[in-house]
Amino acid sequence: MTDENGLLVKLAITPGEANDITVAADLLADIGEGQILLGDKAYDADWLRAMLARQGAWANIPARANRKKLIPFSASLYKARNVIERFFNKIKWFRRIATRYEKLGSHFLAMIKLAAIRLRLRFYESTT
């Protein structure tokens, strides 16, 4: 999860065969009132939308093709989701992450955290 500047806020890794939504509840537990989640179709689940609604947040997630009931969705707002895709691109500048040298999940997670720290420091240098 990143903020509006593309800086890492929360991170969890899952096994390659697991769906990302399995850790969504933990990642989004701190989302606050008035915030908007921009997620892709993999996050289109009724329980996730209900959880966000209870927290006062709103989900802008496109509906899956097999959804019977249409959900409100803003395509123009969804364009801002490229921030997370740009974050993924930036962490792949770091060779150890891009080539997945680290085979243990804990080591790979540590490398991503180090890359995120470096990106945050670059961001603060450019804003001051």
Image (cartoon, rainbow, N blue to C red):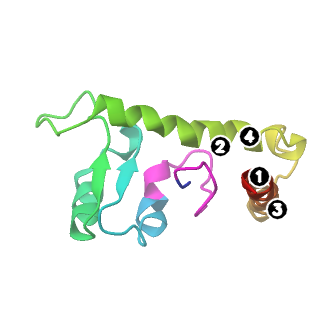
**Dot 4: within a 10 Å radius of its alpha carbon, few (fewer than 14), some, or many (20 or more) residues?**
some
Provide the residue designation for mark 4.
90
Q: Which residue is labeled 2 in the image?
A: 87
Q: Which mark is residue 107?
A: 3
* Crowd band around label 3 with a 10 angstrom C-alpha radius: few (<14), some (14–19), many (20+): few
Q: Position of residue 68 (x, y in %)?
A: 12, 34
Looking at the rendered structure, the kind of residue marked 4 is Lys
- Where residue 60 sits, quadrant-wise, is top left
Q: Residue at x 19, y 34 (%)?
A: 67
Left or right: residue 100 versus residue 79 is right
Q: How many angstroms separate mark 2 from mark 4 (CA)?
A: 5 Å
Q: Position of residue 63 (x, y in %)?
A: 26, 35
Mark in the foreground, 3 or 2: 2
State yes or no: discs 2 and 4 in contact (Cβ < 8 Å): yes
Of the numbered discs 3 and 1, the one sitting upstream in the chain is 3
Could you tell whether 107 is left or right of 55 in the image?
A: right
Residue ID at (40%, 41%): 42
In front: mark 3 or mark 4? 4
Distance from label 3 to label 4 (Cα)?
19 Å
Badge 3 amino acid: His
Q: Which residue is mark 1?
A: 119
Q: Secondary structure at mark 4?
A: helix
Q: Residue furthest front?
A: 128
Q: The residue tagged with tag 3: helix, strand or loop?
A: helix
**Amino acid type at image mark 2:** Phe
Residue 13 quadrant? bottom right
Residue 117 covered by magenta stretch: no
Q: Of the residues under marks 4 and 1, which one precedes in the sequence?
A: 4
What's the magenta bit mostly, secondary-structure-wise?
loop
Q: Are marks 4 and 1 in contact (CB under 8 Å)?
A: yes
